Image (spheres, rainbow, N blue to C red):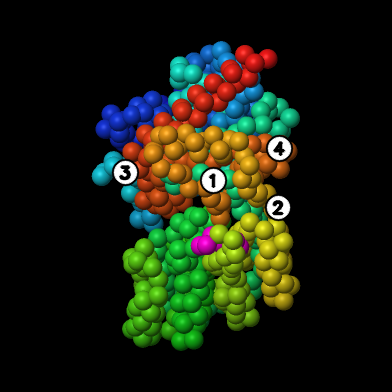
Amino acid sequence: MRHAVGRLVLALYTARAFDVSACGEPQALWRYFRKLLEIPRCTENERAVLDYIADVAKHAGLSSRFNQGNLVVSKPSGDSGEPVIIQAHVDMVCEKHAESSHDFTSDGIQAVLSSGWLSAPNTTLGADNGIGVATALSLMQHSGRLPPLEFVFTIQEEKSLDGARAIDAKALRSKRLLNFDSEEWGILYMGCAGGAVDVLEAKMARVLAPPWQAVELVVDGLAGGHSGADIHLGRGNALKVAAQATAAMVRQGAKVESFDGGDADNAIPRRAVVTLAMPAIMEKAKASMAELQAELLAKLPAADAGLKLTLRELERKPKDVLEEASQKLLLELLEALHHGPVKFSADVPGLVETSSNLGIVKFREDVLEVTWFARSSVDTELALHRAGAADLARRLKLRLRPGEAMPGWKADLSSQMLALVKEEFQLLEHREAEVATIHAGLECGAFAQKVPGIDMVSFGPDIQGAHAPGERVNVESVRRFWALVLRTLARLATSESAKSQEL
């Protein structure tokens, strides 16, 4: 029944298909990725894509099993020896432009191929980590020389690595792992930051609004991006900008009715909407917003050149507004919560060591919820930074809901998997690969915690703008990435065969 459901889902969810043949090789990978674009797979809505993967495995004659909600597929090989885990996550960050009518629960992603890049102009593309999943599906069908493979398709990676953290590692048969969730071709990752998502809550008091005008303040046009990998770029945070703009309006007599912005804790917010009650002083207010917009644009990077601060009158009177103390609390909290890099590595130039992202602000009836994501490659620094947020919560008398810390992945320069992939990259590209750690969460951290001694490396093609509309993947880098995957696995199969002959 599970497989039948998967086929039904594919029939219902159709997208404007890009021309697979125009992408060149590897054709199988691109065909699988096109199928993935047709299946809604936001975090916590992964069942349809898991059904599809299980169906592909079944038709390839491979066995599959569920492991704490994750899907594991085994592919034997004529070469004996220890399997290699091929790991990718099936969920994606679902972000879209405000004007887009795209429904992530039912619509397929519309992809466009232009100038060597495949992109989704109005939404996220899901190349993170759809290319990794499509690679794994291609390997299921590949008839070339491979070692035994164990495919691990994880869920809810974009929600604090929940799938990988829940997996029963005792059911896995290998201590060698290739992770395909990296986004810069030519860089081999051997470590990542840990992190935690904390939520601060406050009960907000309301009073009857004066008989003024309801006004909507919109902050839009920021680039956003990944809250770990892009945090060093200095891009604007729509929640911080909206708080600054709201404070300016409050100084002119405005009162806050609502404040809403951000969609994901691991994405830098691109848009925020504040509803205000204002007396009839719109021209002065608009002039203030234009001045603030110009001031911010002078400081922000070129990627944020589209920033717009817009005030418009709504065709209604304001409803109840925040009581003065609650309004003050809201603005003080949003000003005080840190966003951006906190500390850079003393050992690796340019690498962020500790950072935080002010990710989401929502009102749930009269309860304010603020979501804040801290990251660090040093456990003590992460704890210290989170302690600062906890102190702020105590000072402002807020409720703090601390999230479970996500494990980091400590770099191991003696890794045999790293050395092997590095050698194969050199032979393929005729240049040395860069070896690095990343200021973002990778599921390798969870596997390192669960499987002592596991040997891992993470690499992938060029993907830009992950976690933001306009996300794109470079087609040529996918071809070279696939070639490296095949070379690496053939080398591992050869090594295992040589060991068997020696025995």
Under tag 2, what secondary structure? loop
Q: CA distance from mark 3 to mark 2?
A: 37 Å
Q: CA distance from mark 1 to mark 3?
A: 23 Å
For marks 1 and 3, give the one nearer the viewer.
1
From the viewer's side, name the closer residue of 126 and 211: 126
Q: CA distance from mark 1 to mark 2?
A: 24 Å
Q: Residue at x 37, y 46 (%)?
A: 472
Residue behind mark 3: 117
Q: Do the residues bearing badges 1 and 2 touch, measured as CB atoms within 8 Å?
A: no
Q: Residue at x 49, y 86 (%)?
A: 251
Residue behind mark 4: 453
From the viewer's side, name the closer residue of 109 and 348: 348
Residue behind mark 2: 404
Q: Which residues are magenta?
A: 349-358
Q: Residue at x 67, y 58 (%)?
A: 378
Question: Which comes sooner in the sequence, label 4 or label 1?
Answer: 1
Q: CA distance from mark 4 to mark 1?
A: 17 Å
Look at the image and tell me whether residue 127 can be seen.
no
> What type of secondary structure mainly makes up the magenta span?
strand
Q: Amino acid at mark 1?
A: Tyr
From the viewer's side, name the closer residue of 397 and 382: 382
For marks 4 and 3, give the one nearer the viewer.
4
Residue 364: image quadrant is: bottom right
Question: Which comes sooner in the sequence, label 4 or label 2?
Answer: 2
